[in-house]
Image (tube, helix red, strand yellow):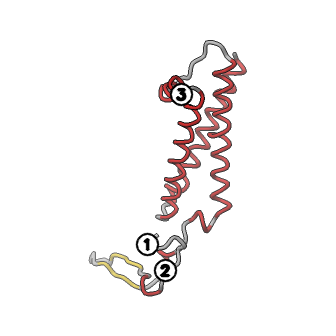
Amino acid sequence: MVCGDSTGSCPPATRQLQARSATGSVVSRPGDADCRPPAYRRRTREFYSLWIAATTTYGVGDIVSTIAFLRYVPGVDEANPLVAGAVDAFGLSGLVGLKIAVYLAMVWISVQGAREDDAYLYYFPPVLLTLVGAVLTASNLRLLWLA
């Protein structure tokens, strides 16, 4: 968002659209395309739906299935070295803390993408966490079933 406030509204005097002409010079004209509120404010249902899906699969599904797998299957260790180090150092709270840190970093990236009107940065983090969470949860449940 180019305008200065968090509401997305710009005073008329500060609204400017800029484009490059064929000669390469910058051409400015008044407009309000850069002053739209971020996507998470314009499409709140979409934003919350994306992050609820990510929370369900990555947050709840993977954490619960990993904890069940580590607690109830003897002789099994975490395969991810980063998660294994967190679990060894801090127990299961290390696993949860690491997941929360990744989740918050991804929310921050998504919000920044929405503010900059970058669709890739807005959609990629929750979709990635949803897919990774679904795969990890399914893998953990499959291993629990086979154990």
Picture coordinates of residue 76 (x, y %)? 60, 16
C-alpha gap between disc 1 and disc 2? 9 Å
Q: Which mark is residue 58?
A: none
- Check disc 1: other Cα within 10 Å, few if <14, some if 14-19, many if 20+: some
Q: Which mark is residue 2?
A: 1
Mark 1 or mark 3, which is nearer the start of the sequence?
1
Mark 3 or mark 2, which is nearer the start of the sequence?
2
Residue drawn at the location 61% of the way across and 68% of the way down: 42
Mark 2 or mark 1, which is nearer the start of the sequence?
1
Residue drawn at the location 67% of the way across and 16% of the way down: 73
> Which kind of residue does numbered mark 1 sit on?
Val
Residue drawn at the location 34% of the way across and 81% of the way down: 27
> Which kind of residue does numbered mark 3 sit on?
Phe
The image quadrant where one finds the C terminus is top right
Picture coordinates of residue 65 (x, y %)? 67, 29
Picture coordinates of residue 34 (x, y %)? 47, 74
Element class at badge 1: loop
Residue drawn at the location 55% of the way across and 54% of the way down: 123
- Check disc 3: other Cα within 10 Å, few if <14, some if 14-19, many if 20+: few
What residue sits right under mark 3 in the picture? 90
Mark 2 vs mark 3: give the one in front. Answer: 3
C-alpha gap between disc 3 and disc 1? 43 Å
What residue sits right under mark 2 in the picture? 10
> Which kind of residue does numbered mark 2 sit on?
Cys
